[in-house]
Amino acid sequence: TTAVPAQIHQGLVWLFPGGGLEKALTAPPPPSYPKMFDGLKKYTYVRDFPIDFPILLSNICDPDHGLFAHQDSAFDMYTASLDCPFESFSSEEIDDGKGWVLETKVDSKDKLQELDRSRRDTLDPKQKKTKKKKSADASTPWATSRFHAPTHVRLNRVDKETGAVKFASLFYVCPVGVGRSRFLSAGISPLKVPRWVV
């Protein structure tokens, strides 16, 4: 049996199998959720999937999949389009070049669904008009996503004026074998989060 360095960070146990204690002390810290989440309700879930690690992780990072794979319109908030491009899209190295983060920010309004509605109206003008959501303005929160390589993804809805978090989904994904992944997720909100959301 070999002992490996470990720590508890924000309720998760992190192991460092890449060397002894000296190497662990100089390694980058585990990904963290911001202090602004303190005091909000957190709902956590763990699932094991028969899906390869990079496929699962790229799936989470691509919000377009949610509309089709999950039939969930909430994912449309995190997508971008020609009419509603990303407000910001940045990539940076962190922890003295030992880590990498990709962040995006976009107005959380319908994009793909709005395109779908407009096409349906063009094809069949007689059909019942669907109720359109308001276009993006100051009352529409930002939809932000953050990928902290190699395992962590965070999706937030943030108030444009106050910066307060309206909702966040956190995902930690790690490989547990060939074609198998462990999926840890959390929903963070002032309100109760339904289990299907996370």
Image: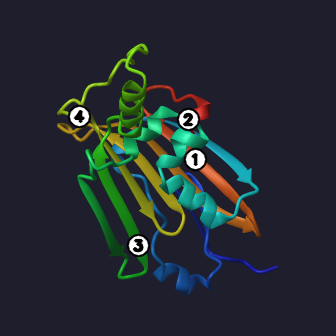
Kindly check if marks 2 and 3 are in contact, taking CB atoms under 8 A apart as contact. no
**Residue 114 placement: quadrant:** top left
Question: Which residue is more in the foreground, 36 or 80?
Answer: 80
**Residue 138 placement: quadrant:** top left
Sequence-first disc among 1 and 3: 3
Q: Give the residue at mark 2.
A: 197
Whether residue 52 sits left or right of residue 150 in the image: it is right
Disc 1 residue type (three-letter)? Ser
Q: Give the residue at mark 1.
A: 185
Question: Which residue is more in the foreground, 128 or 80?
Answer: 128
For image coordinates 44% across by 64% down, the residue present is 148
Pinpoint residue 134: horizontal percent, then vertical percent: 26, 25
Cα–Cα span, label 4 and label 3: 30 Å
Cα–Cα span, label 1 and label 4: 28 Å
For image coordinates 32% across by 35% down, the residue present is 109
Whether residue 116 sits left or right of residue 181 in the image: it is left
Pinpoint residue 77: horizontal percent, then vertical percent: 38, 39
Kindly check if marks 4 and 3 are in contact, taking CB atoms under 8 A apart as contact. no
Q: Give the residue at mark 4.
A: 136
Circle 1: element type? strand
